[in-house]
Amino acid sequence: MRVGLFERRKIMGLTYADITLVNSIDVGMAQRGAMGNADIRQMTVSALVDSGAYMLTVDESIKRQLGLNVFEIREIELADGSRTECEIVGPVNLRFKNRQTACLALVLPGATEVLLGAIPMEDLDVLLDPKSQQLIVNPARPYIAGTKVK
């Protein structure tokens, strides 16, 4: 029996969310009139919501398509315990429903899926609802994101 992607994700207990990734530098250039809004590089992707991951991760293809700048190289430890060096790129505007944040992204090697980690989730003020297996806007603040400062 062949199981579709949506059904497979539900069976496996994984949560995915559609997020839009936007080149923040392009947004700034468009605001200054240096380029048109239609030229802003952006894409909507299905991201694995991973509260165990630290930050947003993308692959090399997304980095290239969005034209993201490399800020630094970091050594990272992967889930299997192996270590590798990866690029930190950005800035990226990340949008989900009525929320948005600006962040950097870690570029993982190969054709890997996008991971939405704990730091951008916190800044978006969204929650992982395990019962419905959905990423949701914080119901305590449905219209405007909240942030803890202390």
Image (tube, helix red, strand yellow):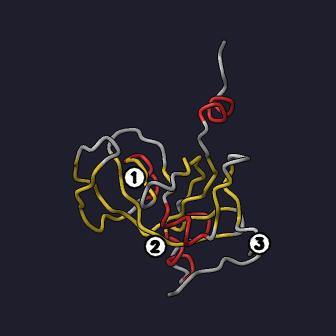
Element at label 1: helix
Which of disc 1 and disc 2 is earlier in sequence? Answer: 2
Q: Position of residue 113 (x, y in %)?
A: 47, 43
In the rendered structure, find residue 145 and report the number of the disc placed on it.
Answer: none
Which mark, by number, is residue 142? 3
- Residue 97, placed above or below residue 45: below
Gap in Å between the C-alphas at discs 2 and 3?
Answer: 28 Å
The circle on residue 25 is 2
Question: The residue under label 3 is which amino acid type?
Answer: Pro
Q: Residue at x 40, y 47 (%)?
A: 59
Label 3 residue SS: loop
* Crowd tier of the residue under label 2, counting other residues whose Cα lies within 10 Å: few below 14, some 14–19, many 20 or above: some
State left or right for residue 72 relative to residue 49: left
Disc with the residue nearer the chain's start (2 vs 3): 2
Amino acid type shown at disc 2? Ile
Question: Residue 110's x, y, as percent?
Answer: 35, 39
Numbered circle sitting on residue 64: 1
